[in-house]
Image: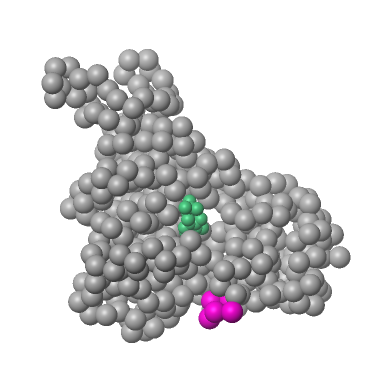
Amino acid sequence: MSEQQHRSKSGFMTRAIHAGYEPDPTTGAVIPPIFATSTYKQDGVGGLRGGYEYSRSGNPTRTALEGAIAALEEGERGFAFASGLAAEDTLVRTTCRPGDHVVIPDDAYGGTFRLFDKVEKVWGVEHSPAPVSDVDAVRAAIRPGQTKLVWVETPTNPLLNIGDIEALAAVAHDAGALLVVDNTFASPYLQQPLTLGADVVVHSTTKYCGGHSDVVGGALVVRDLDLAERVAFHQNSIGAVAGPFDSFLVQRGLKTLGIRMDRHCDNAERVVEFLAGHAKVAQVIYPGLPEHPGHAVAARQMSRFGGMVSFRVAGGEEHALAVCDRAEVFTLAESLGGIESLIEHPGRMTHASVAGTDLEVPADLVRLSVGIETVDDLLADLDRALG
Ligand SMILES: *Cc1c(COP(=O)(O)O)cnc(C)c1O
């Protein structure tokens, strides 16, 4: 089957396994080799083989990953970076100039907020926070003529708020801005923002795409060829590219993304059910729960509700910290999206930097990244940790 057919006709798992790579013509290698090379022999001056000249500009292992992630997001072209934040910075410098403005989630991933607040601002790109779950608030935050990007995460972190991608795309486009969706929490298996009107998808491939907590990486996928050309120029000019070893690991992760996500979701659903019935739990936050304010939108735009679960512990911060300390199968650590279950206290860990601001999270909040272990062991661990 040709590359084009993989993109347009095949199912998700087939694309995840095959898109972006044809078995190597010289050896028949079924899996993309790790091309640990910085440069490429030319057949006479300017006679490039397959367009490869220098590995910042292009490397076959990275090309395979970029093709795969573009196919999974149903985009025109994908780009792999050294980290999620490197992808974000490259996108901002591609699309914004001094004096431009970006609307960001009022509960954006901390590193994204810091990038806009401490770095992009210095270079003249301003930002306004708005809640992604409130389309009118996002519209009101737009500065006509000045806003170039409407930046959305859905679900958000750690309160799992949901933004309506279709409605937000219309709001952005009305103002002549692009809609950027950070799809890290859902992964392309559960949600394809480009098919709902978004212009750019951002990933920290460190999380579900890589999926094994063994690599840091990022990606952009775009729908428009002209924007793709401009991103390609900036990716090469800035140079924060994914190396061949990292590209190999992320693509290896993508091949099993579908089965991992189904298991993450299965286990998360059981964890939610268990926590909802537990006397020491004050509130469970999960977009799959009918009482979650974003449930209807999530049900429309996601195929399932993901592996991230947050909950508030009865008895306040002290008890929330004790739960984190007592868990054993759930490892106490930041990050998310790997095969192993993680537990953390956002107020003291991932979100410590927003303490005392409007973005402060409840002190009794615990966040889980539910892994793919045997679910009974996860439930027993939570039961023990809750005491
Ligand atoms: C981790 C994360 C990022 C940043 O990605 P890095 O790979 O750590 O640079 C961006 N957005 C979200 C939602 C994340 O979880």
The answer to which image quadrant residue 105 occupies is bottom left
Q: Residue at x 54, y 76 (%)?
A: 359
Q: Judge from the rendering whether residue 53 lies leftward or rightward of residue 67; answer left or right.
A: left
Query: Is residue 228 visible in this depiction of the protein?
Result: no
Residue 235: x %, y % from top left: 29, 46
Nearer-the-camera pick, 264 or 97: 97
Q: Judge from the rendering whether residue 9 lies leftward or rightward of residue 317; answer left or right.
A: left
Work out which residue is located at the far left of the displayed protein and give it: 45
Residue 133: x %, y % from top left: 45, 77
Nearer-the-camera pick, 143 or 1: 143
Asked if 82 appears above or below 332 in the picture, the reply is: above
Secondary structure mostly taken by the magenta-highlighted segment of the chain: loop
Circle count: 0
Q: Residue at x 55, y 45 (%)?
A: 211
Where does the N terminus fall, quadrant-wise?
top left
The answer to which image quadrant residue 65 occupies is top left
Asked if 322 appears above or below 53 in the picture, the reply is: below
Work out which residue is located at the far front of the displayed protein and give it: 122
For the magenta stretch, what is the residue range? 356-360
Q: Residue at x 57, y 51 (%)?
A: 337
The answer to which image quadrant residue 318 occupies is bottom right
Residue 199: x %, y % from top left: 29, 61
Query: Is residue 308 visible in this depiction of the protein?
Result: yes
Q: How is the image coloured?
A: one colour
Does 359 appear in magenta?
Answer: yes
Q: Residue at x 39, y 71 (%)?
A: 104
Does 153 appear in magenta?
Answer: no
Where does the C terminus fall, quadrant-wise?
bottom right
Nearer-the-camera pick, 127 or 278: 127
Residue 29: x %, y % from top left: 41, 20
Work out which residue is located at the far top of the displayed protein and give it: 27
